[in-house]
């Protein structure tokens, strides 16, 4: 039996391999808190739902691009040889770029793909398409799109902030009070983009508790906070957080506890915000009583907390989910303004945090080292979409959209090309997506499994998984470099994305440009050489490639303990922020000049379009929390053991408060229908008071599995919340997704529930009859 190291976004593991089968999984010995998701490798890699051979939708193979696009998702596939598949793809890309131009190829290809630096699917697809003239791209992430757009106006870029978060050991020593909005969920800290050596969030937080930090959380789900922290829980009406923050700010001002020197020296625009806070400008003082009416909390609770925050070294944190709702920009802007009024930004243990443990790297102490990655070349196409505007792109060619203060237009799309992401997982309002999905002539995907994305494509090219190829593993905000050796042969005829693009590039006459004559191992050596040179510039000796490959791992020295914005606090003239004024902008002249109702010039309470406070709550009285799943990464390995073991009544579990269950006559284990005007899905019921009354939790990631494939509005059998969510931008500024502002109703599903079938392959023909 061989033991071979592999890496995933949720950690590093040793796979036991016997006769080309994976028979066991052990976590990496140095990881103090490994994720159970790794157990899904046992059945998930060599699973019947893997795509094993290139496959073409039947009508498409018979009639070519644009054939019966309404049958996407409903027709059988026909297997073809790789050479035929390469021909089909290269001819279609050629046709479209010649007849319409490269902007007609949409290849934002958003998604998490897999760990492994070289075989990173997005790097591969973008490099390949840049070799043939480019593609329409997407900007920002589903994770924190609103933050990425608002924060540069207010304090600095999200990437810069995430790299500079105050690290756990500093919090342990200095933080007296941590006030959390949306919790700090350890389930999320299992993950890190690109991989994890040591999971540090749990020990980091628990050390704070042991050292006496008090934790207070505002949020609907108790599991968002580790029970060990003995947090004080408040359960405000979801999406009301900005009103609570405003009331905390109001109390600080009213009591004269706001830090006037800090606001004067480090910020601009407090005087433009103050009339709003006091109500001078709109007739409504943002008092605790006012916020109580919106959030359902006690005014006294808010007032007392404000006083305590002013007395103590306080860290105010907001999870990324806080800005994945209507007007998500406001939640982050107001978090920063509240922290600025407390005046502790740049002090150890104080200030603000945006997404601690959202991934393991936030809070983790690491060395700031940029690992080498594949050069993607230059994209000659200027067109782009904000990432969550994919359905709009396809449905509204030629129409204008607003983004960050400017107007742009959607180009017309003929080809959609995806590798390493799953829009049938990540995008909101799947029924609207299905409508949009009928528009392009061709949909080409590289997929590992027969999930909803590959089922709704025309050309499906089977991609290998990390354990099936050689790679190097390294991640942002993580200190480890791993040699990832191929553990098993790829299933069937699956190839890695590099080999697939090499084959297509060859047909299109750009083979050498794409590969630069390098094999997989040549590329790993090449990337290692860059890493080694970078390490040398830090006086770190890294072994040569052969020694590293033999050794299997390399670790960077421990980074410094970080205090976010300490430099800025020490000398704001020497270390100005990258905002227009160089200061924290409580009022932004730039944002104000855009004259957007959906994002005014200072943080503002704007009522969400869909929440428990809206008239729609009469028909759909439950707020849906489609948060990140505990047992997988999004849709990845939903077919694997860890995720499948967590299903209830064969589908995704929906958790509901006991009183809400009782009033609907529901009990644990029931199959329930979750619905609103946009769609309906079936889930298995869990009942528990870990969720707030009036909300239901249905995590993202179950594979969309319609009762009637290809029919828009069909009932989903597996519990995918995105048949229920809204497809609208956070605002005209950020255009981020609003997955967390959604209302639903839940009822028992009467009769025999349809069987979930999505974890078995669709109908596949060996050849055209
Ligand atoms: N309702 C709701 N929706 C959400 C969210 C939410 O909170 N609620 N969260 C959003 C967020 S924050 C995010 S980041 C997105 C995540 O959305 P995605 O990143 O799109 O989700 P994944 O399931 O990780 O999709 C990755 C896909 O890539 C494939 N893949 C993996 N490795 C490879 C590879 O090497 N090659 C190829 N060709 N394919 C590969 C996998 O099979 C999988 O289908 O979802 C968003 N959607
Ligand atoms: N296990 C696992 N971990 C993951 C991922 C995964 O798929 N699986 N995905 C990763 C990715 S891509 C990302 S972006 C991060 C996401 O990190 P987050 O965006 O923070 O994750 P969520 O789980 O969506 O949300 C965290 C909690 O916020 C609360 N919440 C939602 N809306 C509100 C609100 O209006 N007010 C308040 N106060 N609370 C609210 C919910 O109770 C929810 O459980 O997680 C990463 N980690
Ligand atoms: Mo994300």
Image (spheres, rainbow, N blue to C red):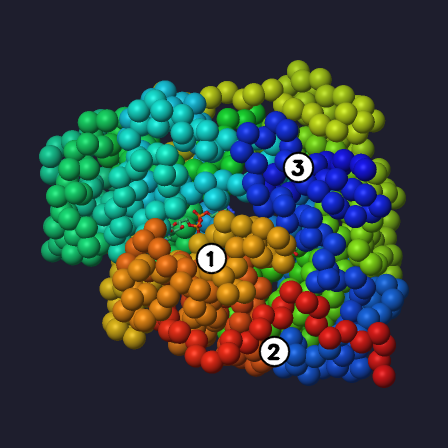
Image coordinates for residue 572, horizontal then vertical, percent: 36, 25
Mark closer to the chain start, 2 or 1: 1
| Residue 625 appears in the rendering | yes
Disc number lying in front (2 or 3) = 3
Question: Does the Cβ of the disc 1 residue fall within 8 Å of ligand 2?
Answer: yes
502 or 446, nearer to the observer: 446
Residue wearing tag 3: 26
Which image quadrant for residue 266? top left
Element under disc 2: loop
Image coordinates for residue 550, horizontal then vertical, percent: 81, 27
Question: Does the Cβ of the disc 3 residue fall within 8 Å of ligand 2?
Answer: no
Residue at 11 percent across and 34 percent down: it is 255
Residue wearing tag 1: 699
Q: CA distance from mark 2 to mark 3?
A: 39 Å
Q: CA distance from mark 1 to mark 3?
A: 26 Å
Image height check: is 215 above or below 643? above
Disc number lying in front (1 or 3) = 3
On-image quarter of the C terminus: bottom right
């Amino acid at each position: 039996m061989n033991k071979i190291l592999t890496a995933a976004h949720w950690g590093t593991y040793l796979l036991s391999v016997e006769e080309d089968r994976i028979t066991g999984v052990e976590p990496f010995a140095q990881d103090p808190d490994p994720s159970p998701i790794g157990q899904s490798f046992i059945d998930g890699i060599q699973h019947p739902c893997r795509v094993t051979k290139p496959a073409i939708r039947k009508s498409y193979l018979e009639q070519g691009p644009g054939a019966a696009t309404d049958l996407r998702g409903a027709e059988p596939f026909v297997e073809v040889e790789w050479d035929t598949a390469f021909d089909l793809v290269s001819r279609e890309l050629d046709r479209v770029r010649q007849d319409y131009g490269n902007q007609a190829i949409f290849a934002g290809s958003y998604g998490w793909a897999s760990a492994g630096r070289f075989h990173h699917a997005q790097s591969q697809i973008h490099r390949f398409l840049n070799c043939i003239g480019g593609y329409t791209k997407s900007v920002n992430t589903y994770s924190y799109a609103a933050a990425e757009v608002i924060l540069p106006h207010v304090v600095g870029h999200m990437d810069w902030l995430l790299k500079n978060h105050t690290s756990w050991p500093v919090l342990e020593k200095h933080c007296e009070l941590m006030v959390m909005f949306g919790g700090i969920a350890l389930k999320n800290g299992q993950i890190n983009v690109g991989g994890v050596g040591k999971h540090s969030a749990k020990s980091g937080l628990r050390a704070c508790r042991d050292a006496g930090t008090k934790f207070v959380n505002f949020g609907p789900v108790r599991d968002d906070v580790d029970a060990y922290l003995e947090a004080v829980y408040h359960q405000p009406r979801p999406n009301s957080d900005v009103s609570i923050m405003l009331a905390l700010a109001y109390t600080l001002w009213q009591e004269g506890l706001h830090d006037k020197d800090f606001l004067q020296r480090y910020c601009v625009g407090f005087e433009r915000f103050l009339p709003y806070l006091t109500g001078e400008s709109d007739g409504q003082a943002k008092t605790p009583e006012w916020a109580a009416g919106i959030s359902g909390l006690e005014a006294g609770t808010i007032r007392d907390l404000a006083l305590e925050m002013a007395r103590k070294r306080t860290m105010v944190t907001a999870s990324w989910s806080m800005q994945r709702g209507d007007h998500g920009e406001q939640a982050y802007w107001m978090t920063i303004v509240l922290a600025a009024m407390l005046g502790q930004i740049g002090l150890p243990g104080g200030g603000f945090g945006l997404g601690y443990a959202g991934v393991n790297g936030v809070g983790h102490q690491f060395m700031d080292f940029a690992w080498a990655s594949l050069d993607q070349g230059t994209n000659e196409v200027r067109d782009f979409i904000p990432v969550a505007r994919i359905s709009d792109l396809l449905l509204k060619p030629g129409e204008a959209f607003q983004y960050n203060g400017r107007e742009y237009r959607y180009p017309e799309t003929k080809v959609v090309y995806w590798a390493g992401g799953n829009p049938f997982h990540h995008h909101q309002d799947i029924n609207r997506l299905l409508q949009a999905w009928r528009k392009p002539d061709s949909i080409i995907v590289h997929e590992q499994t027969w999930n909803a994305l590959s089922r709704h494509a025309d050309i499906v090219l089977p991609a290998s998984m990390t354990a099936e190829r050689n790679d190097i593993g390294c991640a942002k905000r993580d200190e480890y470099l791993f040699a990832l050796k191929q553990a098993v042969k790829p299933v069937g005829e699956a190839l890695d994305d590099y080999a697939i693009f090499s084959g297509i590039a060859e047909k299109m006459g750009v083979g050498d440009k794409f590969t630069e004559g390098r094999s997989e191992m040549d590329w790993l050596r090449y990337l290692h050489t860059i890493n080694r040179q970078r390490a040398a510039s830090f006086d770190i000796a890294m072994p040569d490639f052969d020694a590293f490959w033999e050794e299997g791992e390399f670790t960077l020295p421990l980074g410094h303990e970080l205090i976010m914005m300490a430099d800025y606090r020490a000398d704001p003239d020497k270390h100005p922020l990258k905002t227009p004024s160089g200061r924290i902008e409580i009022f932004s002249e730039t944002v104000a000049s855009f004259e957007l109702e959906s994002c005014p010039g200072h943080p503002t309470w704007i009522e969400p379009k869909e929440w428990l406070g809206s008239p729609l709550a009469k028909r759909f009285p439950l707020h849906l929390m489609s948060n990140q799943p505990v047992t997988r990464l999004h849709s990845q390995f939903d077919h694997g053991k860890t995720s499948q073991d967590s299903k209830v009544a064969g589908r995704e579990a929906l958790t509901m408060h006991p009183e809400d269950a009782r009033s609907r006559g529901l009990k644990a284990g029931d199959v329930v229908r979750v619905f609103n005007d946009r769609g309906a899905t079936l889930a298995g019921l869990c009942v528990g008071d870990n969720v707030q009354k009036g909300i239901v939790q249905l995590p993202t990631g179950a594979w969309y599995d319609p009762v009637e494939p290809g029919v828009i509005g069909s009932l989903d059998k597996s519990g995918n919340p995105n048949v229920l969510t809204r497809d609208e931008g956070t605002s005209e500024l950020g255009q981020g997704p609003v997955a967390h502002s959604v209302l639903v109703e839940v009822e028992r599903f009467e009769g025999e529930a349809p069987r979930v079938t999505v974890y078995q392959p669709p109908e596949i023909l060996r050849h055209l009859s």
